[in-house]
Image (cartoon, rainbow, N blue to C red):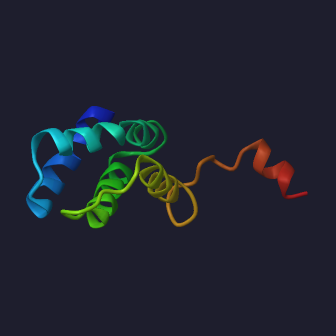
Amino acid sequence: MRPADAVRQLEYAVAPTTGTYDYELTHWASAYEEAFADVTERGDLHDVMNVIEQVCEECSEDSRPSPEQVEVVADSVLTSGGRPITDGGDDADASDR
């Protein structure tokens, strides 16, 4: 999934629950595109959908998570409790010594 497609999915998921459409929603979703780019590059479709689900839970009529908060969510999906950032290669072995 491309980052722009992930942003569009987020728009579709959030709009009915917050009653927000068009400009405001597009503004926030575009602000999150960098975080989605990271998830699509390092993760898979399941990871992208997991981030969308978690961000939707944090959205309400009165507030949206900041881009920084979405990056934290994305990192949590891709690290402990989620997918590992690395495959445990040479750097991971060196830090264990």
User: Between residues 68 and 35, which one lies in front from this camera angle?
Assistant: 68
Is 17 on the left or on the right of 54, as rendered? left
Residue drawn where x is 51% and y is 59% of the image: 76
Residue at 58% from the left image edge and 63% from the top image edge: 80
User: What residue is rendered at 84% in x and 53% in y?
Assistant: 95
Residue 54 horizontal side relative to residue 43, left or right: left
Query: Where is the C terminus found, in terms of image quarters?
Result: bottom right
Is residue 6 in view? Answer: no
Asked which quadrant contains residue 50, the reply is bottom left
Q: Is 52 situated above or below 35?
A: below
Asked if residue 79 is positioned above or below residue 27 in the image, the reply reads below
Q: Provide residue 25's location: percent of width, then percent of height.
A: 19, 45
Nearest the viewer among 30 and 89 is 30
Count all numbered tags in the image, as a single digit: 0
Decide if residue 84 is in sight here: yes
The quadrant in which the N terminus is found is top left
Give the quadrant of residue 7: top left
Q: Residue furthest right?
A: 97
Q: Residue 61 versus residue 69: which sits nearer the camera?
A: 61
x and y percentages locating residue 8 in the rendered image: 19, 40
Residue 16 point in image, percent of width and height? 8, 59
Left or right: 33, with 81 as reference point: left
Question: Residue 52 location, x and y as percent?
Answer: 30, 54
Picture layout, residue 78 above or below residue 6: below
